Amino acid sequence: MAAASPAPAKLAGKYDALDREALVRLLERRDAERQLGLVWERDELEADRADHRDYVALGLEPSLSHDDGPWPNLIIEGDNLDALRALRMSHAGRIRCIYIDPPYNTGNRDFVYNDRFVDKTHRFRHSLWLEFMHKRLVLARELLAPDGVIFVSIDDNEVFRLGMLMDQVFGEENFVANVIWQKMDSPKNTAQHFSDDHEYLIAFARSKNSWRPQRLPRSEEMNARYKNPDKDPRGVWLVGDLAARNYYSLGTYPILTPSGRVIDGPPAGNYWRVNREKFDELDRDNRIWWGKDGSSRPGIKRFLSEVRDGVVPQTLWKWEDVGSTRHSKQELNSIMGSAGSPFFGTPKPISLIERVLRIATKPDDIVLDFFAGSGTTAHAVAKLNAEDGGNRRFILVSSTEATDDQPDKNLCRDVCGERVRRVLGGYTNAKGEAVPGLGGGFAYLKARRVAPHRLSTRLHHAEIWSALQLLHDLPLSHWDGQGLVAAADARSAVAYLPDIGDGSEGGVRAWHEAQAERARTLYSWTPDRVRAWAPGAQVSPIPESLRLRFGVRA
């Protein structure tokens, strides 16, 4: 694959017809409108070929799916801009957590724009990356639930531009944190300047006022800090500082210790956290620790039994807690053997994504990763579900990453899909040991573009049925090609009638009666004809309903 050549000067001659006064007015207007923020050469870039106005259909591939279905989880093969547009039709406002690991734009054949690698010499290298990311982040924002959050992995190559871009897309008021991940478990002694030991995870909420992090589990090491030297019947405790720097008008008074020593007041520049009355109350309740000899500066006893479950997430994630790049490569090799290495050399540790999910999800949430790579996010979702009994669902999106040099390469099928299949169903690791599966299944879908004016002739029945199930938040089932198909959950029922034939009326009436307790929606190419067969049901036309929901015109 050749390196991308600099884009042609599209604006040559654009201002030739303007006289001096017109040019001055244009510059003055631009100066008046200029604001602090991120600007890139959008008008001078080659258009992103993935940005089109076609309908995007998702075709189910049963042979590449895992388990018998219906499938609550999805793996989508295709350009992620296509997949995001398709998901916007069915999942807008429903995704609780998005995690992505986009190309870092290092210039070392890691970022592809319009089927060409962007190298370090490209004039618009950073602008191409920003345009690429901007289109996808705008769609990601639409998919997030009102109390959803997105985490984006990045390194020093684009971290500053990404931060400003996310300020622009999500609003700087919704910035949550810039987490530092210590990716190396030992320094690089060959580094010319500094050993590059960390990367970042930038987190933005859809609405910071609505989103709150889940607390992380307390570790055994944390609990081991609690002791009980005075045999307090309330159990182990940890001493907390009674002094603080925050000004408190009632926090400057002398204290007499049990040994008779007088402490004139808190340390210089500090104040006692409680007033005299509260302090005496705590002391009577044996909640003040004076040291073993009774003469130390007082501290407050904080009992483990009274500490809130879990700890507040911090912004420094050490490799001992969430893994390193070395661990992540070992994990992938243990699952995939040599099959994973040629395709994917930069996986993330399972523990790192687990940390994200523990902070950002509850047991029934949907997780999206549209730069799915080796499928670590699905692995982490399944692992966490197995641990806490949750029903989190994952949606992964990955391209094939085929190139002119490797036209048969398919990262999504051969690495992402295969890894998740092994993790869910069980596998034999690199040591020859049997590893039991974590359980669950997924539907494997392929994204396909269909021109809006050809929906009536080019849209397959199986693609329509997949779209309708997703629209109604139902797990996917395979299209069997036999007349009326239907699915339902506790609240609603949906059916699709692809054509009219013998028995169609009886099938529709039977479905309508069987689902009498649910809200019913029937989709048909001939809605006027079948409406009388299902009185009280909503009858919607195909393909108009899908075209309208997707937002394309014929």
Image (cartoon, grey):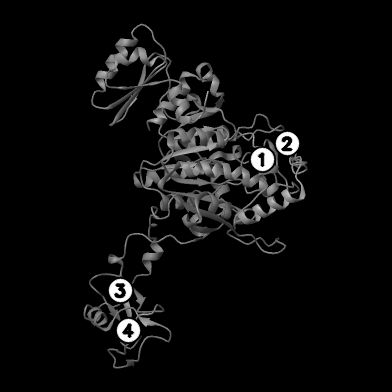
Q: Are marks 4 and 3 in contact (CB under 8 Å)?
A: no
Q: Position of residue 491 (x, y in %)?
A: 28, 31
> Is tag 4's residue or tag 1's residue first in the polypeptide sequence?
1
* Label tally: 4
* SS category of the residue bearing label 2: loop
For label 4, the crowd category at 10 Å Cα-Cα, with few meaning under 14, some 14 to 19 and many 20 or more, is: few
For the point 41% across and 30% down, the residue is 470
Q: Answer above or below: position of 91 versus 200.
A: above
Residue 228 is marked as 3
* SS category of the residue bearing label 1: strand
Residue 112 is marked as 1
Q: Position of residue 382 (x, y in %)?
A: 42, 42
For the point 69% across and 38% down, the residue is 46
Q: Are marks 1 and 3 in contact (CB under 8 Å)?
A: no
> Is tag 3's residue or tag 2's residue first in the polypeptide sequence?
2
Q: Which residue is mark 2?
A: 1
Residue type of the residue flagged with mark 4: Lys
CA gap between label 4 and label 1 equals: 65 Å
Residue type of the residue flagged with mark 1: Val
CA gap between label 2 and label 4 equals: 72 Å
Residue 292 is marked as 4
> Is tag 2's residue or tag 4's residue first in the polypeptide sequence?
2
Residue type of the residue flagged with mark 3: Asn
Q: Are marks 3 and 2 in contact (CB under 8 Å)?
A: no
| Front position in the image: 69 or 104 | 104
* SS category of the residue bearing label 4: loop
Query: Which mark is nearer the camera, 3 or 2?
Result: 2
> Is tag 4's residue or tag 3's residue first in the polypeptide sequence?
3
Q: Are marks 1 and 2 in contact (CB under 8 Å)?
A: yes
